[in-house]
Image: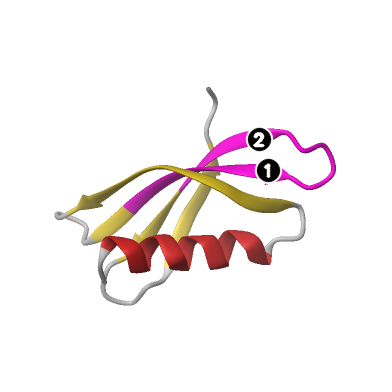
Amino acid sequence: MNKEEAVEKSIEYVNLFGYVKWHELKSIEFINEKSIWKVIFYAKQNESNEVIKYKLEVDNLSGDISNLQMIEN
């Protein structure tokens, strides 16, 4: 999986939730030791339009997504 595919999977995953929409990519980094992509992004809350920073991890081999977390600024 390349960087662009990891971002596409992340966008699809985040937009599945009814309460947030993907807003903007902040950064993406490949963690070789774990074979994961660490994605940091902004998502907009649907009800308040507040933009909040999140992170998640995409497994490079399976494409599985885990560890979706809100990040305090």
Percent across and percent down for residue 68 are 52, 51
Please report contact status of discs 2 and 1: CB closer than 8 Å, yes or no: yes
Which label is found at residue 13? Answer: none
Please tell me which residue is depicted at 48% across the width and 61% down the height of the picture: 10
Percent across and percent down for residue 50 are 73, 33
Percent across and percent down for residue 42 are 55, 41
In the current view of this chain or complex, which residue is farthest to the bottom? 62
Horizontal relation, residue 13 to residue 45: left or right: left
Q: Which residues make up the magenta segment?
A: 38-55
Q: Is residue 40 above or below residue 1?
A: above
Please tell me which residue is depicted at 34% across the width and 50% down the height of the picture: 38
Which label is found at residue 51? Answer: 2
> Which quadrant is the N terminus positioned in?
bottom left
Q: Is residue 63 magenta?
A: no
Q: Main secondary structure of the magenta part?
A: strand
Residue type at tag 2: Val
Which label is found at residue 44? Answer: 1
Horizontal relation, residue 66 to residue 16: left or right: left
Please tell me which residue is depicted at 41% across the width and 71% down the height of the picture: 64
**Does label 2 or label 1 sit earlier along the sequence?**
1
Percent across and percent down for residue 46 are 79, 47
